[in-house]
Image (cartoon, helix red, strand yellow):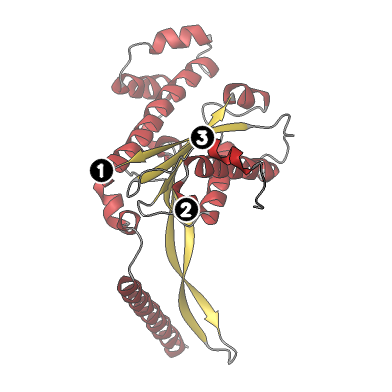
Amino acid sequence: MANSRYEYVRQFESDDRLLPSTWLVVRIDGQGFTKFTTKHGFEKPNDIRALHLMNHAAMTVVEHMSDIVIAYGQSDEYSFVFSKDSQAFDRRASKLSTLLVSQFTSAYVFHWHEHFPATALLFPPAFDSRVVMYPSDRIMRDYLCWRQADCHINNMYNTCFWMLVQRGGMSVKEAERRLSGTLSRDKNELLFSEYGINYNAIEDIFKKGSVIIRDRELVDVVDKAGMTSKRSRGVVRTLHCDIIKDAFWISHPEILRGKLTGAERKKERVRQREIELSAEASAAAATSNDLKRL
């Protein structure tokens, strides 16, 4: 930026850099989505097209921002978790918040017709965003547990509510009164006894939401001589699983691990190469067995 006598106005900008060594979570929420979903004919209680669109937009964000280690979404919200050692945009809250929400929104609009090919976008959707700092691994995990527990509670209520309205012929007020004060076991009984629905059999994407992680996969690579070998590459995956129990975190230690040192990166490359060689040996053995059977 060129120096000029007007540059003094920069003194009025506030420093909004976030605390170091803390988990940063950017959560985006749909604004006015009750109206938006009604006008665009979303299915109730869940519209699988809308959830896939949310996941598509979220994956676009994760693929763009390498410091995001995990993201979790349900309904019209998504949470993006940055590693504790992230220095993205100097950890400036305004930069992180505005970039993520604008990229998410633009991706949502851009991919709309892939998921709603027969529905015109009548007016632009809007999302808000906020950034929250969490000082420890446990508190960050508890945040994600809170969002997944909220997904289950809301989905169970909404499933019962819309069954009462759509199949039970109740008005909105009548359905609300019927469900007032009920517990989870009451809602489970209502769904099963009155509508033959086993809540546990409902798709996990509705009950547990969506989890986006970074993973690795083996792919075949053909060299110039026509020889095929196995190579490991990074991928972004969407899961629908339990993130409250420890099993998920034990299976994905890289989420909490943070950035690797030079020695750790070298060790990881050796480990990935061992996996590649093992896969190549298994493929060669399978080919050999096939030839013997001919």
Q: Residue at x 40, y 10 (%)?
A: 178
| Marks 2 and 1, the one that precedes in the sequence | 2
Q: Earlier in the sequence, mark 3 or mark 1?
A: 3
Q: Looking at the picture, which amino acid does disc 2 mark?
A: Ala
130 w.r.t. 286: above or below: above
Circle 3 SS class? strand
Q: CA distance from mark 3 to mark 1?
A: 23 Å
Q: Which residue is mark 3?
A: 129
Percent coordinates x, y for residue 174 in the rendering: 47, 7
Q: Could one spot residue 96 in this view of the protein? A: yes
Residue 218 place in picture, x, y as percent:
45, 71
Q: Nearer the viewer, residue 43 or 218?
A: 218
Q: Which residue is mark 2?
A: 88
Is 239 positioned to the left or the right of 227 in the image? left
Q: Front-most of 207 and 111?
A: 111
Q: Amino acid at mark 3?
A: Ser
Camera-near label (2 vs 1) is 2
Residue denoted by label 1: 138
